[in-house]
C-alpha cells in the first residue's frame, strides 16, 4: 500500500499561507485496526512563520472485536486534529537565501524534512479513538461459559444452574476473598443478575 505523503514546503516557506488537502486514506492493517471505510476529511496546513499548524476533521469506521461475544462489529469514529510544529530558519518567501524547515522532535515523528507522513499522523489519532473495553452493544450477552455459544443468537441447551441462588452468592463472596478475579470475568458472570434480586429479598428479612 502506498503511503500518503504531503510536501508542505510551499506552506513552510510562505508565512501566512494556508492550504487545504482533501484526504481519503486506508491505513495499513499492521499499524491500526482494520477499517470498513477509508479515513475521510480535510487536512489544513498553515504557516505562522515560526509555527506550522496542522488541523482537520476526519471520520472513519473501524472493525473491532467485542470483548464479550468475540464477534467483530463496526465502530464509527470522528476526530479532530490540532498539531503545532516549530519552524527553524528563515522562510525563503521572506529572504531569497533563506530556507525554513519543520522541527519534529516527537518520538514518533510525522515529518521528514518538510514532508508530512499523513499515514503516521492519522494512525496516531485513530489509536486514540479505540475504546478500552470494546463491546458490540451495551446489552451484549456474551458467550455461555459452558458451551461457548454466542448468547446473542439465542439460548443454549446447557442445563440450568443447580442450587439455591442465595448459596451461590455466598459461595461467590467467599471465593472472591481468596481469589483475585479480573473485573472482566466478573462482568460476564451469569451470577451478576442473580445477586441483584437476592439482595432485594434479603432486605425484607
Ligand atoms: Zn458482543
Ligand atoms: Zn451453553
Image (spheres, rainbow, N blue to C red):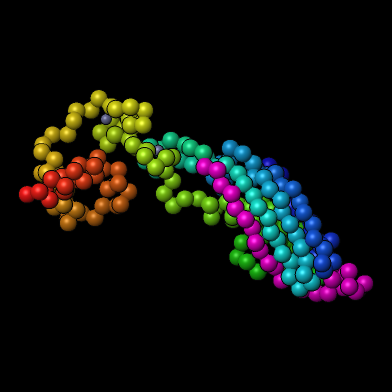
Quadrant for ligand 2 reads: top left
- Is residue 165 visible in the rendered image? The answer is yes
Please tell me which residue is depicted at 62% across the width and 46% down the height of the picture: 59
Magenta span contains residue 92: yes
Please tell me how many numbered marks the rendered image carries. 0
Horizontal and vertical percent for residue 63? Answer: 52, 40
Horizontal and vertical percent for residue 45? Answer: 75, 60
Horizontal and vertical percent for residue 180? Answer: 24, 55
Magenta span contains residue 167: no
Residue 170, compared with residue 51, is above or below; it is above
Horizontal and vertical percent for residue 201? Answer: 13, 45
Drawn side of residue 36 relative to residue 103, left or right: left
- Is residue 28 visible in the rendered image? The answer is no
> Residue most toward the left?
205
> Residue most toward the front?
204
Q: Which residues are magenta?
A: 75-99
Please tell me which residue is depicted at 19% across the width and 53% down the height of the picture: 176
Q: Quadrant of the N terminus?
A: top right
Residue 125, compared with residue 96, is above or below; it is above
Task: Place residue 163 in its image quadrant.
Answer: top left
Please tell me which residue is depicted at 64% across the width and 58% down the height of the picture: 81
> Residue most toward the top?
157
Please tell me which residue is depicted at 71% across the width and 51% down the height of the picture: 42
Task: Place residue 25 in its image quadrant.
Answer: top right
Drawn side of residue 105 relative to residue 146, left or right: right
Residue 24, compared with residue 12, is above or below; it is above
Amino acid at each position: 500500500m502506498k503511503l500518503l505523503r504531503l510536501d508542505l514546503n510551499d506552506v513552510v516557506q510562505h508565512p501566512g499561507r494556508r492550504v487545504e488537502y482533501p484526504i481519503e486514506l486506508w491505513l495499513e492493517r499492521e499499524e491500526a485496526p482494520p477499517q470498513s471505510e477509508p479515513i475521510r476529511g480535510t487536512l489544513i496546513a498553515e504557516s505562522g512563520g515560526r509555527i506550522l499548524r496542522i488541523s482537520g476533521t476526519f471520520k472513519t469506521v473501524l472493525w473491532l472485536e467485542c470483548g464479550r461475544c468475540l464477534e467483530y462489529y463496526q465502530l464509527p469514529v470522528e476526530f479532530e486534529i490540532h498539531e503545532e510544529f516549530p519552524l527553524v530558519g528563515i522562510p525563503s518567501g521572506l529572504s531569497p537565501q533563506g530556507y525554513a524547515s519543520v522541527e519534529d522532535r516527537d518520538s514518533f515523528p510525522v515529518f521528514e524534512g518538510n514532508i508530512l507522513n499523513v499515514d503516521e499522523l492519522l494512525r496516531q489519532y485513530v489509536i486514540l479513538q479505540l475504546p478500552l473495553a470494546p463491546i458490540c452493544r451495551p446489552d451484549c450477552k456474551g458467550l455461555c461459559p459452558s458451551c461457548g455459544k454466542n448468547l446473542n443468537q439465542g439460548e443454549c441447551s446447557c442445563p440450568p444452574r443447580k442450587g439455591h441462588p442465595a448459596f451461590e452468592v455466598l459461595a461467590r463472596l467467599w471465593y472472591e476473598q481468596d481469589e483475585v478475579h479480573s473485573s472482566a470475568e466478573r462482568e460476564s458472570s451469569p451470577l451478576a443478575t442473580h445477586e441483584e434480586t437476592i439482595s432485594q429479598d434479603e432486605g425484607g428479612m
